[in-house]
Amino acid sequence: MAILNILEFPDARLRTVAKPIKNVDERIVKYSKDMLETMYEAPGIGLAATQVNIHLQLIVIDISDQKTKPIFLINPVIIKAEGKVETSEGCLSIPGYSEPIIRYENIEYEALNISGREIREEATGLLAVCIQHEMDHLQGKLMVDHISSTKRQLIRKKLLKQQKQHA
Ligand code: GNR
Ligand code: NI
């Protein structure tokens, strides 16, 4: 397994639209394992392949306290969504910032699991929010795209400054 580098806003590669996965083969299983390890180490509750510069429709999530319930979703699609909920969201690609974001409270989604089998599930609360946050990443969209452009530009400036100091 390996810890992968997480891209940080405003890196243009985070704007890449991920491609659907045609075959859930060994390569995808390896990416999934590396992403899970990277997410646990960060630590975070979700990670989209886009964030580690892999532009395929793959996300990993684990919202359990003991980090023992990983969920792998391939080619996810939301088929029903209802209700609204506001959550203070963080993002591993926007370190040090959290912002209140409004998302659907309940969703129904389809995806392939790590075995390549079609699944159809319901999610609510933090899991539903996390799936929406990760699915945004696969479309090249970030949490900061949901806030005012003034706030987004401020965060951009501060992160660029920080990245230059660490370079
Ligand atoms: O670790 C994360 N926490 C989080 C909290 C509230 C809503 C969404 C998230 S996802 C985030 C990890 C991340 O950046 N995933 O893309
Ligand atoms: Ni994120």
Image (tube, helix red, strand yellow):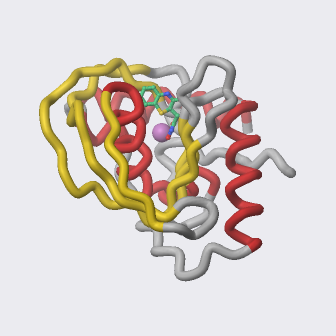
Q: Quadrant of the C terminus?
A: top right
* Percent x, y of residue 38: 72, 41
Task: Tell which residue pokes out farthest to the left in this image.
Answer: 83
Residue 62 percent coordinates (x, y): 58, 34
**Camera sees residue 68:** yes
Residue 107, relative to residue 65: is it above or below? below
Tell me how many marks there are.
0
Q: Residue furthest bottom?
A: 22
Image x and y of residue 117, in percent: 53, 67
Residue at the location (46% across, 74% down)?
Answer: 20
**Image position of 30 (left or right of 136):** right
Q: Is 161 placed left or right of 26 in the picture?
A: left
Q: Quadrant of residue 140?
A: bottom left
**86 to the left or right of 30:** left
Q: Position of residue 103 (x, y in %)?
A: 23, 34
| Residue extending farthest right | 1
> Looking at the image, which residue is at 68% across and 68% down?
28
Whether residue 16 is visible: no
Q: Residue at x 39, y 25 (%)?
A: 89
Is 83 situated above or below 53?
above
In the image, 139 versus 103, the foreground residue is 103
Residue plotted at (31% across, 31% down): 124
Answer with the quarter of the image where residue 86 lies: top left
